[in-house]
Image (cartoon, rainbow, N blue to C red):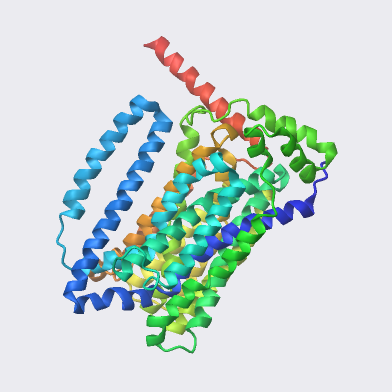
Amino acid sequence: MKKHSNLYIYGITLVATLGGLLFGYDTAVVSGTTAALDNFFVKPLFDNPQTSLSVVFEYKVIVSLCLFIMAILISNFLLKLFGSKKGTVYSMSLFVVGILIWYYQFWNQSGELTETMASSIKGFVISSALVGCIIGGALGGSVSSAIGRKNGLIIAAILFTISAIGSALPDTLNIFNVEMVSSLIFYRIIGGIGVGIASMLSPVYIAEVAPKEMRGKLVSFNQFAIIFGMLVVYFVNYFIASGGSDEWINTIGWRWMFASETIPCILFLSLLFFVPKTPRYLLLKGDDEEARKVLSHLYGNEEMEEEYRSIKSSLIEKNAPWLSFGSIVIVIGILLSFFQQAVGINVVLYYAPEIFRTMGAGNDAALLQTIIVGAINLSFTVVAILTVDKFGRKPLMIIGALGMAISMTLLGATFYFGTVGMITLICMLLYTASFAMSWGPVCWVLLSEIFPNSIRGALSIAVAAQWLSNLIVSWTFPMMNDNAALTQSFNHGFAYWIYGIMGVFAALFVWKMVPETKGRSLEDIEKIWHKETVSSKKDMSVSDVKA
């Protein structure tokens, strides 16, 4: 039985989870500002044609720039996956198709402010941080390999701080010399880059310092911190808004909401200087002596050598090609990330106050009900933490996906049949509980476990896919929910039914494709993909012989 330095392990884990707390804080702070941002930035544009033309043009430029950056990142992934020859062909095909779609479906559209364009701008303002999350998630692997997990988290903390201050004062700190709403978007994207980096490196850092029998629980702490950060900011938003008039919230209150993030940012940045680098990263860089020191703190001198040899043996191939273990691990990582967002969780978390206002709640009541959603989210995340190493990853993921599918279907039905009320709130709470006990924390546990050490950088593909899915879901929700034709036909229920269908697909995917990783070391999990690769090669050989 190993005797770990539990107090030390818990201490450095808690510091790393502050990255998750800021992840939750930064992405959820916008939930309290959605109405204010619409009233302050978007609605006044209809009364100012000159400014609206400028905003629409800048919006098109910013979106185009973001699409270009994402295309470059995707091309980089293709090169790493398929090599220079095939990767270049796939990248050029991507650019050609992308340019045609971009020009005819986006850039060539009218520059005037229409209802659809206003909804699109509103959705982008609210979800703009997610663009940065995609960039940060895509860069996470390179940052992790180049400067390490710890230093990458330090960079993320600095970006969080810049974003918090800039988002609160987009007019005063308008260093980009653009319309104020565009300045806000830029600062939110900067914060999103920090979130994207932290979303990858925090769970990786924890997974690499945690003993295998504690790893599921400790990595789940990161999701707990994310949800706790969301709950904290729900309370912060509520107390900032309570007692203030709607006019004050629309002009000043939203600034305080963004500025409040500077406190946890500074705390996170300060504490990071007191945690070690991970032993796996140190061994990858050839710093064996320092790695031994860290392992001795984690495991004690008696068990340190066994862990050292185990990690060392798994690092024979340094920075191996990302398809060294076949494509299945990449595909599973991407689909885990896709389904975690496609089930619509961030619609509930980002737009909860808007949804409650649709149900007839006032501003304070909507924010208060959002706190209830956050409390349920946090409570059932604890359930996942306590059960993930007992019941396993797959059962929790399948049960949670089916729970979300049922809840979202019923939620959409309450809107469709015009029976919104207490049953609608109950559906939202059941949905949130289902996600919190499964896909919220357990998805991150799986992502931190399934990628072998020598291709750990490939995790950045999954993280980028997660943020891209998040962006698409969050950006398109206002378009579906505010669309006159869909509202007339489905009475605001359409989007929720889409998310319900995704829950069913998510359950089927986990059942059929995802391996159980409970109780296995990272090195044992790596052997799964070795077996898959060998099996695939044998199947190909048999096919060749038959041919």
User: Toward the viewer: 50 or 91?
Assistant: 50
All told, the count of numbered labels is: 0
- The image quarter containing residue 255 is bottom left
Q: Taking 354 as reference, is 305 above or below it?
A: above
Residue 418: where, in percent of width, then height? 33, 76
Residue 376: where, in percent of width, then height? 57, 69
Please state if 197 lies on the left or on the right of 116 as rendered. Answer: right
Q: Taking 174 as reference, is 541 above or below it?
A: above
Residue 360 in sight in this render: no
- The image quarter containing residue 300 is top right
Q: Outermost residue, right direction? A: 302
Q: Residue at x 21, y 72 (%)?
A: 51
Please state if 409 lies on the left or on the right of 374 as rendered. Answer: left
Q: Residue at x 27, y 64 (%)?
A: 120
Residue 349: where, in percent of width, then height? 46, 66
Q: Residue at x 35, y 55 (%)?
A: 472
Please state if 470 lies on the left or on the right of 90 as rendered. Answer: right
Residue 70 in sight in this render: yes
Quadrant in which the N terminus appears: top right
User: Toward the viewer: 270 or 226?
Assistant: 270
Quadrant in which the C terminus appears: top left
